[in-house]
Image: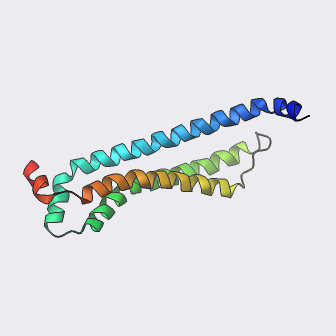
Amino acid sequence: MRALISDSIADRRFIVTLLAVTAALALLMSAAGVYGVVSHATSRRISEIGVRIALGASPSSVRLLIFRQGFSAVFLGLAIGIGLTLVVMRMLSGDVAGLETSHSATLAVSIAVVSLAAAIACWIPARRAARVDPMAALRCE
């Protein structure tokens, strides 16, 4: 009986596994994209960061500045994504059988995972920017 049940749900299990792998790859690619954009924006501002540090900015304030800049775009994207998700879920709930719009826990977990990945992707360039040597940054200009 176990083999019969296992065979009957094998297709669904494969599709769910394939979706999970695709979602993990999408999350990884989005985190890499956020990291790349924030890292590039930070590298373009090295002289500004060097001046800030030379004038007395603390490393924590530099980290906060870079992190806030990167995460503001992520926050905007999350807000737009959540809004679109809620609208599309409401539209599809009448057309797709078994689709419920009241899975707030799933939405909260998704938001938390994306926010955590984006926070890590923003934190790495922010930490690197806080370690900029002001003299080396000013010599580059």
51, 131: nearer the viewer: 131
Query: Residue visible at 28% across and 48% down?
Result: 41
- Location of the N terminus by quadrant is top right
Residue 19 in percent (x, y) is at: 64, 36
Residue 137 in percent (x, y) is at: 14, 53
Residue 120 in percent (x, y) is at: 42, 53
Work out whether 16 lies above or below 133.
above
Residue 107 in percent (x, y) is at: 63, 54
- Outermost residue on the front side: it is 2
Query: Residue visible at 44% across and 45% down?
Result: 31
Q: How is the image coloured?
A: rainbow
Q: Count of labels shown? A: 0
Work out whether 31 lies above or below 70.
above
Displayed quadrant of residue 93? top right
Query: Residue visible at 14% across and 61% down?
Result: 51
Left or right of 64 in this view: 120: right
Residue 115 seen in this snapshot: yes
99, 116: nearer the viewer: 116
- Outermost residue on the right side: it is 1
Query: Residue visible at 40% across and 57% down?
Result: 72
Work out whether 99 lies above or below 106.
above
Residue 141 seen in this snapshot: no
